[in-house]
Amino acid sequence: MKSTLEELLARINILDVVSQYIKLRKAGKDYIGLCPFHKEKTPSFTVSTEKQIYYCFGCREGGNAVNFVMKYENLSFREALESLAKEYGVEIRSGGDPRRASHFDALAKLSEYYFDCLKNSRATLQYLSRRGIDEETIKEFRIGYSDPSGNRLKAFLKGSGIPNDVYLSTGIVRMKDRDLYDMFRGRVVIPILDVNKKVIGFGGRTMEKDGVPKYINSPESSVFSKRIALFGIDKTRKHIAEQNEAFIVEGYFDFISLYRHGFRNIVATLGTSVTEQQVSKLRNYTNNVSLMLDGDEAGIKSALRLIGMFAEMDLNGAMVLLPGGHDPDSFVRKEGVEAVRDVVRTKKPILDYYFDYHMKKEGIKTLEGKQSLIKAVMPYIEMINDGVKKRLYIKRLSELTGVEEGYFALYDREKEIGAPQGGADPVNIIGKRVVSAFIHNPDLLELFKGKEVIEYVRDENVKEILVKMLDSYAETKQLEMKSFIEVLEKEELKGFVLSAAFDGAESDDEELKTILSDYFKHLKKQFIKDESKKITEQLSEAEKRGDEGAVMELLEKKRQVLTVIKNNFL
């Protein structure tokens, strides 16, 4: 495993890996961006191409390229290793989490089964044709059909080479009265893929006009959650990053229709309202997110609840309302591409739409209408963290209602901006500087190799790190961070080292030597002082006992310690 990891890390540039998921910009010799693992508005996520590691100074997540993919994709270490190994052409033995791996295998087989079933269902092909789905689109999205015949499903399961209990564990294949059946039977089936193009679940659409429910999704599993997944992101994430904007639509066919008409910076939710997890995922590619919804009251109210979330994540949220009760699928098929582009050009911030919607519904000319508008929009204005943007909305509200801007200060509940919570970092700050010095100039480890001074280190975490550093350096004559962090089993040690790796980068060799010399001199002095204190206590006890031999021996030890202190530290 170790040799495979080292070979893989030698081929990978962490910047290439992380840039597939996160928007980064150069800052000095490193790259920074918004951390995908916690909410933040100011970038604290840092990637070092020199050391081939990443670290977030906000949530303290860090590691090498494999660790990043593991964390971001919610994979085991082995699975992340295999995923990158496949991408970079490094051979690796099979393995990993059996439950998760078997899920992926079963879902991939089911996807091909549904795709094959569609070829033999003329009615389903005609249904898709009426919806503008041609053969090319069917192949690209691997659209399928679940044959309601139990015999066909049984024949597939028997010949798939995967045990039935694995299919049952996905929740898609089920058992009733000792008979196996498929939850999507009789439906059009659309595979849902993750960013690595692995099938993680399915959406099933009824073909019956009044069929209920219209859509069903795979059940929650170890690889699928409809609150996290975004349909189509495997195809569009790079386009979203390039165009610096994402459009969210509500359904599979909305996405497919727009995509086949040339719209590439889109994703679709899976029958749920837009969730924080989905928005957080999109934020890795852009800070501009627009909702493309039908313009009914439910659509607008659904969008309104996102204002606070967008403000918290420092995203620009906008809306595109389609006319005449259309959804994106029906609108692009009936009115064409240019009509969609024209509507997109009319997009507005979500709160602007609510202003317009509420004034049209309640009116603005009467006293009651003005009061109603203030009451309706002020809670959403309060959610805005950007002070300038908030003042502009207050100014607009003042102009519309005739109420002076100062009055709205009564409503304003801006949070006081204070210092970061908590005190200083609880880790040994001096010890961190020493670890940082060794990271930036590993050759300095030669000066301390084999010396007992390491034993003087009282912080057990720092001591363990230094011992492992010396061992690694003795073995390879180098200290590569991307490999060394895998030697550290404890997460707190890994975080300590990653944080230290981004400290003190501008120090020159002489300064680093001074830091190390002062540190170990301090440790030795402290150690000797502690020994002197122990001798004094032992001497007092020997005198109480009347043990003259022990007193004389301890006095000699005390004299030697004082001589060392005088010669070395005074």
Image (cartoon, rainbow, N blue to C red):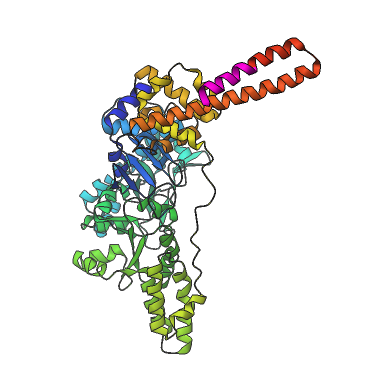
Q: Residue furthest right?
A: 545
Q: In the rendering, at what x and y percent does residue 221 appear?
A: 47, 43
The image quadrant of residue 348 is: bottom left
Q: Is residue 75 visible?
A: no
Q: Residue furthest top?
A: 549
Please state the extent of the stretch shown in magenta in the rendering. 558-570
Q: In the rendering, at what x and y percent does residue 451 appear?
A: 47, 17
Query: What residue is drawn where x is 46% and y is 30%?
Result: 518
Q: In this view, does 239 lie above or below 504?
A: below
Q: In the rendering, at what x and y percent does residue 219 appear?
A: 46, 47
Foreground pick, 171 / 411? 411
Residue 88 in the figure: left or right of residue 207: left
Q: Is residue 353 above or below residue 90?
A: below
Q: Is the magenta stretch mostly helix, strand or loop?
A: helix
The image quadrant of residue 479 is: top left
Q: In this view, does 547 lie above or below 284?
A: above
Quadrant of the drawing holding the N terminus: top left
- In the image, is residue 477 part of the stretch drawn in magenta? no
Q: Can residue 373 be seen in this view?
A: yes
Label count reads: 0
Foreground pick, 453 / 368? 453
Q: Residue furthest left?
A: 338
Query: What residue is drawn where x is 43% and y is 26%?
Result: 487
Q: In the rendering, at what x and y percent does residue 269 appear?
A: 38, 56
Residue 553 in the figure: left or right of residue 211: right
The image quadrant of residue 273 is: bottom left
Q: In this view, does 541 lie above or below 138?
A: above
Residue 537 in the figure: left or right of residue 121: right
Foreground pick, 77 / 453? 453
Query: What residue is drawn where x is 36% and y is 26%?
Result: 442
- In the image, is residue 565 part of the stretch drawn in magenta? yes
